[in-house]
Image: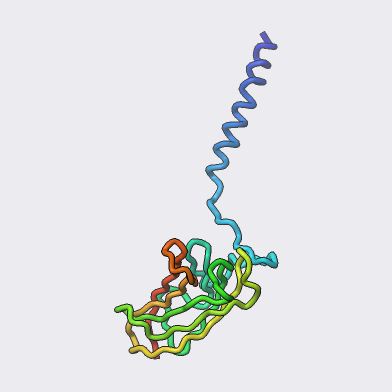
Amino acid sequence: MRHKHIYIIAAVLPLLMGVIIFLGTFSKPNTPPPIMMEDGSDITGLSKLVTVNDYIYVTSLKEGEIIQSPLTVKGFARGTWYFEASFPVKIVDSKGNVLGQSPAQAESDWMTEQMVPFSGTIEFTAKEGEKGEVIFEKDNPSGLPENAGELRIPIIFGK
């Protein structure tokens, strides 16, 4: 009789451990993987991180921020976002009128699928207090819609 209990425990214990491990995978927080640069540095914790689909991260601007001319933009984009080491950045008003445009330049080798730092400066003229957007466009020399991409950050124009 005593051996019967041991056999039951031996059969049930692995099953119970499997259930505990399986349920434990659902209790872990869903944290995204780190955003790594080609040199191995992690940019995940940077402030003002605004992104679209893990292709571009803007670190110098956040949604709803008050901006003025000239605007300097900085961040990181995957090498596939660039063409010939740059991509266009536009500032538009609430009606979509382009107020300023300039390329953002890669600050290191852009021939990679890893994150590459960028910076750019855009001059523009706008009425104080009006709303607009800063648009970071994936450079798309082919013009094909499947190769297009953009990140739009709503802003407010200041003095």
Q: Position of residue 85 (x, y in %)?
A: 58, 76
Q: In which quarter of the image is residue 77?
A: bottom right
Of residue 115 and residue 41, the one placed in the foreground of this image is: 115
| Residue found at x 46% / y 78% | 89
Of residue 155 and residue 136, the one placed in the foreground of this image is: 136
Placement of 6 over or under 140, stated as above or below? above
Q: How many labels does the image show?
A: 0
Left or right of 74 in this view: 10: right
Q: In which quarter of the image is residue 67?
A: bottom left
Give the colour scheme shown. Answer: rainbow
Quadrant holding the N terminus: top right
Left or right of 48 in this view: 13: right
Q: Where is residue 104 in the image (x, y as percent from the top left)?
A: 53, 79
Question: Farthest residue in the left direction?
Answer: 95
Q: Position of residue 69 (x, y in %)?
A: 44, 89
Of residue 61 and residue 37, the one placed in the foreground of this image is: 37
| Residue found at x 41% / y 81% | 91
Question: Farthest residue in the top direction?
Answer: 1
